[in-house]
Amino acid sequence: MAEAILPLVGGAANVTSVTHCMTRMRLGLADRSLVQDEPLKALPDVMGVVEDDTYQIVLGPGKVARVTPEFEALAREEAAAAAPAAPRTAEDLAAEGAAIRAARKEKNATPVKLMLRRIANIFVPLIPALIGCGIVAGLNGLFTNAGWLPALTPALTAIASGFMSLIAVFVGLNTAREFGGTPILGGAAAAVIVFPGVADVSAFGEKLAPGQGGVLGALFAALLAVYVEKGCRRVVPSAVDVLVTPTVTVLVAGLVTLFGLMFVCGEIATGIGHLADWLLQHGGAAAGFVLGGLFLPLVMLGLHQALIPIHTTLIDQSGYTVLLPILAMAGAGQVGAAVAIYLRLRRNTSIRKTIRSALPAGFLGVGEPLIYGVSLPLGRPFITACVGGAFGGGVVGLFYQLGTSVGSTAIGPSGWALFPLLKGNHGLGAIAAIYALGLAAGYVAGFVATYFFGFSKQMLTELNVPAEGEAPAVSGRNPEPPQGKEAAPAPAPAGGPGSLV
C-alpha cells in the first residue's frame, strides 16, 4: 500500500511530513501539483482524499496505523538513496528534532502518560509562585544568618511561607479544574488539610496534624470532590442542585479526607522523603550517576512529569527537594556536548550558529533548543550528553553521602538559574560550591565524551562541511584540509569568529 501511494504523491522528495490520525494519513507536500489525485483515489484501499493544511489520504481505522509507518520508512529510504552524501545543516537537524518531538507526543498519548500530563497541568501553574517564594526564602535566610535588616526578616518569612502554607488549596483548585469539576469545590475539599482545627480530629488512633498528607492528600481530596460533584449532578434535581451538590461534595470529600486520605497520604509522603534520603545516603555517587544520566531519556519519554508531585512533596516536607539539583546535571552534560559539537564541526557554519544562539539558554537550564535542534537529531551526541549529566549527578550524590545535601526550594529552573534557589543542611556557600562543582563535572564529562566518542568517521565526513552556498568557516592562513582528514582548529581571538561568546 505504501509503495503504491508514494509515487502518486510525487515521491519522497515531495513529502515534507508524515503523520496520521484515527482514519487519515496526513502528508505535508512541497509541491501540491505533483500529486496524481485520480490514480490515488482509484487505489483499492483509498477511501478518499481531503485537502486542508495537510494532504489527507483516508484509509480507515486500523489500516492507517499500519500503512503510515511503512510509508514513512519507505519515504525515508528513498530520500536517503537519492542524496546519500548531502551535508546536514542546522535546519535539517531542527526538522528532525521537530519530527522526533511530534513522534514523542503521539507516543505519549497512552493512558499512563496522559495521566502524567494531567498531573503536570496541576503542578506546573504553581511553579512561578514556588520560584518567587523560594528566592525570597533564600534572601531571608541570608539576611538572618548575616544579622542584616532584623526588622525586615519577619516580613520576608511571612511572604516566603504564606504560599507554602496554603499550597494544598491551590493544588485542589487546579486538580478540580483539570478533571472537569468546579475549582472552588476542589479547593474547599483540599483546604481541610491545612485547617488548624484538624488537630482535634483523630484517625486510625492518632491525632491529625495540620498539613498532614500535603499536596498528595490535596490532589486526592480534590479528585474525590470532582467525582462526587459529577455524581450529584446526574441525580440531583436541578431545582435544588445549587444547594445539594456543593453541600454533599464538600461533606463527603471532607469526611473521607479527614478519616482516610490525610493519614494515608501522610504516610506516603513520609515514605517518599525517607526513600529519597535513603537512596542518596546509601547510593551516593552511584544513585546520583544513574539519576543524572537517565533524566534526559525520561524527558524524551514524558515520564519526568511523574517527578513533579515528588519534588513538591519534598519541598512541602523539608523546604527543599534534593532530587532537582541532581537531575539538573543533565542540562550541564547537554551544554558540554554542545561545546564539543561546536569545536568538532568547525566548518559547518549552520550548526555552529544554532549552537551559539542556544548556548546561553542552555547555561540557564533551558535545554530544549540544544536537545531538539542539535544533539538528539545527531544521535550519538545525545547519548554522550547523558554521560555528562551522569557524572555531574554523581558528584552531587557523593557529597550527599558524605553529609552535605544540596536542594532546591522550587522546581522549574536549573543550570545557573538554580543558584538563587539552593538550600540544604549546611551554609549557602558550601552548597553553592558543591552544585557548581557538579555543573563543572557535567560540562567537562559531556564535552570529553562527545568530543572523543560522539562522532563516527562517517558522521564527521558528512557533517564537517559548509552548507551549500556558504564559504568554509576557516580563518587566517590555515588552508582547508583535504576531504576526509581533520585539522586542528585555528585559534580565534576572544569574541571573534569561532568564539562561543
Image (spheres, rainbow, N blue to C red):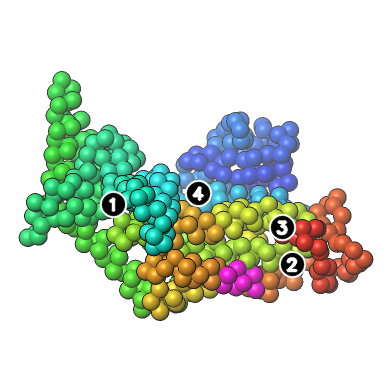
Q: Secondary structure at mark 4?
A: helix
**Total count of labels:** 4
Residue holding disc 3: 501
Identified by mark 2, the residue type is Arg
CB under 8 Å between callouts 1 and 4? no
Of mark 1 and mark 2, the one earlier in the sequence is: 1
Of mark 1 and mark 4, the one earlier in the sequence is: 4
Look at the image and give the residue range highlighted in magenta: 440-448
The residues tagged by marks 4 and 3 sit, at their Cα atoms, a distance apart of 34 Å
Image position of 498 with respect to 10: above or below? below
Counting from the top left corner in percent of width and height, residue 173 is at 30, 40
Which label sits in the foreground, 4 or 2? 2
Counting from the top left corner in percent of width and height, residue 67 is at 56, 48
Residue holding disc 1: 215
Residue holding disc 4: 105
Is residue 487 toward the left or the right of residue 361 in the image?
Answer: right
Q: Secondary structure at mark 2?
A: helix
Identified by mark 1, the residue type is Val
The residues tagged by marks 1 and 2 sit, at their Cα atoms, a distance apart of 47 Å
